[in-house]
Image (cartoon, rainbow, N blue to C red):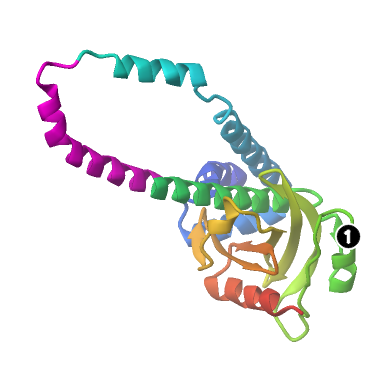
Amino acid sequence: MACEAWREKLDGYLDGELAPPEATTLAEHLRTCANCATDALDRVQLKRSIAVAGKRYAASAELRDRIRKNIGGKKRREGGWIWQMVALPATLLLLLALGVGWYVAREKTQQQRVYAELADLHVATLASASPVDVISTDRHTVKPWFEGKIPFSFNLPELQGTDFTLIGGRVTYLSQAPGAHLIYRIRKHEISVFIFQDREGESAKLSSNPKVIVSFTMESWTKNGLRYFVVGDVGAQDIESLSKLLRDAG
């Protein structure tokens, strides 16, 4: 019965609609309940499949050209040139405003999509029966494991004297680009660290300030040509502390 109550809230959890205390409690339940974790994983995979399917259709060049011709072919009223001279400045200003608004909205949507995809990867990995492919608390074991599996190298911090523990890592993908997915633990909470090559495009324009998205706190930055993401259902202070260790890793 308890699981049925939690499963009714899974969609809200995955969409970031639960209050932080409830989201944290549900996350703890997923760590101990294989059935609910499997259900969460299935829903994450369904969300990603729907997102991919929604991008498959795009208007063809012929359709866009036909629409332009239909709009441009409308008969203009006589004397319309006078109205055009009056309306042109206002139209240009309107188009400029719409263009700027569209660009800002587009950038925001891209950022949200990247963060949502990372949150899905975080949930799916923790719900998996084998969340990591290399299991070790030793950074000197985990780092060499990635050699030859991803097209870059990275440094990991020394955790002695901190509250963090390295669990292990696996290869993952963001927008078809390979990267490293590391799992850290602090006070029974798992934190995902994603590392990818910093490419010009979606991830290059992401803000580096900590933010709460889809029930998780996230932080991102670039270093030595790499883009780092830290994702977890912990407070901003823990995310910032782990991020600082990663930034300072030699």
Q: At 72% across and 48% down in the image, what residue appears?
A: 177
| Element carrying mark 1 | loop
Residue 195 horizontal side relative to residue 114, left or right = right
- The answer to whether residue 28 is magenta is no
217 relative to 61, above or below: below
Query: Quick check: can you spot residue 138?
Result: no
**Of 204 and 162, which appears nearest the observer?**
204
106 to 144, vertically: above or below: above
Task: Give the main secondary structure of the magenta stretch.
Answer: helix
Residue 197 vertical position relative to residue 127 in the rendered view, above or below = below
Say which quarter of the image contains residue 217: bottom right
Q: Position of residue 250 (x, y in %)?
A: 77, 79
Q: Nearer the viewer, residue 140 or 215?
A: 140
Q: Amino acid at mark 1?
A: Glu
Give the residue displayed 58% in from the left and 74% down from the top: 240
Confirm whether the magenta stretch covers residue 93.
Answer: yes
29 sits left or right of 71 in the view: right
Q: Quadrant of the N terminus?
A: top right
The residue pinned by badge 1 equals: 147
Q: Position of residue 55 (x, y in %)?
A: 56, 31
Horizontal and vertical percent for residue 115? 56, 53
Is there any visible trace of residue 148 in the rendered image?
yes
| Camera-side residue of 159 and 113 | 113
Q: Position of residue 218 (x, y in %)?
A: 56, 63
Above or below residue 12? Residue 206 is below
Which picture quadrant has residue 243? Answer: bottom right
27 displayed left or right of 68:
right
Pointer 1 local density, CA inside 10 Å: few below 14, some 14–19, many at least 20: few
Q: Extreme bottom residue here? A: 161
Left or right: 64, with 5 as reference point: left
Q: Which portion, as a residue range, is magenta?
A: 76-102
